Each structure stands twice: as C-alpha cells, then as structure tokens.
Amino acid sequence: MKRKSTALLFVLFLLLSGCVHPGKSSDKESPDVVHQYIGYVVKHKPDQLLVTAFSANTSQSEAIWVRTKKQYGLGTKVAVEFNGEIETSYPGQAAVKSIEMIKADSPQGADITAEDIVARALNHFNSSIPIVKAVEYLSNEKLWHVTLFDDAQSNHSEHVLVFTQDGKLNK
C-alpha cells in the first residue's frame, strides 16, 4: 500500500509540474516591465503627445499617444520609457514613466536644427498619423530633405519636403 501511495504521489507531482511554464507567471505583463521608445512628437492633445518612429532596419513604423503633463514642440525627438502595458489600439496609448528630449544640433552650414525642420515639415504635411522616415541636410546643396508618410494610409506613399538651409520651403 505504501508503495502505491508513493507511486501515485510521484505521478501526481509529474503531472502538476508539467503544467507550469518556467519564467512566465502569466500572459499579462508585470507593471514593472519598462518599454523604451525613441521618436518624434508629431501631434498634441491636452496632456498627450503623439510620438511616432520609423526603423530603417526593419522598415517598421510605430505610433503611440503618450500620456504626460510635459509639453514638447512639434518635431522634438524624444526618448520615452513606459511603465507597464501599452494599449494595443493604433496608435497605441501608454502612461509615461519618463520622457526626455534628445537635443538636435544644427549641421554645419545649416541655420536651423533638425527639430525646427521637422516641425516645419509637419506643418506642411496633412496627415492622421505622420511618420518621419528621414531627415537629412545636404551641405553641398544647402538643402534639407524631410521624408514623411501617413501611417493611416495603407499605401504609405512617401512625401519628400525640401527646405532651404534657413528653413524656407523650396517649391
């Protein structure tokens, strides 16, 4: 009888231990999980900023409405840390743990910063979810090129806006 009880307990232990996933306590993320994100401020709402990003490596874009009391101008590049989950709507939504501006310098020969050029480009680009794909200053031509697309549009047709070195739209 003792042998049967020991064998039964051993089998029961094996069955129960097979149901546990090591290192994963549940399907939901812990509120201690921190997500990091770098992108451009492309829109404002009271206590919210729409921050979008484009990865040239993966050709993927992202957009998240960031809940924060801090205010940043259009075109500002920011580093954001989120605490806990990011809502999966598109654009996503999340509360901020921290947000910091990434300083933009003026390239040699340019009269204004990349941040200012992105802000001017966003003011000339009518879009639901604007994604800044690329910002470059061509010093030999003394021109800025800003490539944008609307992530709400399925075709993602790109628009290149060209500005002079002092920030005037080059038509």
Image (spheres, helix red, strand yellow):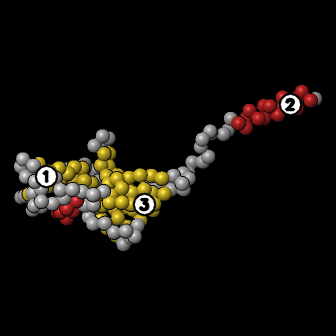
Where residue 98 is drawn, which disc sits there? 3
Q: Which residue is mark 2?
A: 6
Which residue sits at x=48%, y=53%? 34
Q: Position of residue 54 (x, y in %)?
A: 30, 49
Where residue 17 is drawn, which disc sits there? none
Q: SS at mark 3?
A: strand
Gap between marks 2 and 1 measured at Cα: 79 Å
| Mark in front: 2 vs 1 | 1
- Amino acid beneath label 3: Ser
Which residue sits at x=19%, y=65%? 123
Q: Which residue is mark 1?
A: 108
Viewer-proximal residue among 122 and 138:
138
Which residue sits at x=83%, y=32%? 8
Gap between marks 2 and 3 measured at Cα: 55 Å
Question: Are discs 2 and 3 less than 8 Å apart at CB?
Answer: no
Q: Position of residue 45 (x, y in %)?
A: 34, 70
Q: Where, quadrant-wise, is the N terminus in this rendering?
A: top right
